[in-house]
Image (cartoon, rainbow, N blue to C red):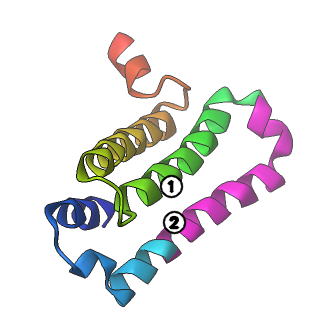
Amino acid sequence: MFTARGAYAIAGARWPYAGVVRYLSYAIDSVLLTAALMLATMLPSALFANQWLTVKLLLVVFYIALGVFALRRGRPQKSRLIGFVFALLTYILIVGIAIAHHPLGWLRLIWN
């Protein structure tokens, strides 16, 4: 959903800023962040014992911040595009870390 919304917003479409799509996106980000915080409170010792989990949770917060930056109106299109690309790369890193259970994520899968 973020990919479609971001691509259309950067292209100049108005629907990514419409009420339902916008608030559904907020809901998804809120659930993601809430799940991360719940995991951190339920497993406080595991959070620091497993570096991959710490990196993943920090990247979730970074991903949400980049997404807000990329979709915020009033910013230059070039900076929004850069924020959008970095948000997508961050998401790919999050998925790689979750699959590999290692802070390097996809890089670890490539090196092994």
Q: CA distance from mark 2 to mark 1?
A: 7 Å
35 magenta-colored: yes
39 magenta-colored: yes
Q: Is residue 76 left or right of residue 41?
A: left
Outermost right residue: 45
Q: Pointer 1: residues within 10 angstroms few (<14), some, or many (20+)?
A: some
Give 27 or 107, whichever is nearer the viewer.
27
Q: Position of residue 10 (x, y in %)?
A: 21, 60
Q: Position of residue 72 (x, y in %)?
A: 40, 64
Instruction: Specify the amino acid type for callout 2.
Output: Asp
Report helix, strand or loop for mark 1. Answer: helix
Majority secondary structure of the magenta segment?
A: helix
Q: Position of residue 78 (x, y in %)?
A: 24, 46
Q: Residue at x 36, y 55 (%)?
A: 70
Q: Which mark is residue 29?
A: 2
Q: Is residue 26 visible?
A: yes
Vertically, is 50 above or below 72? above
Q: Which mark is residue 64?
A: 1
Instruction: Specify the amino acid type for callout 1.
Output: Ile
Give 14 or 43, whichever is nearer the viewer.
14
The span picked out in magenta is 27-48
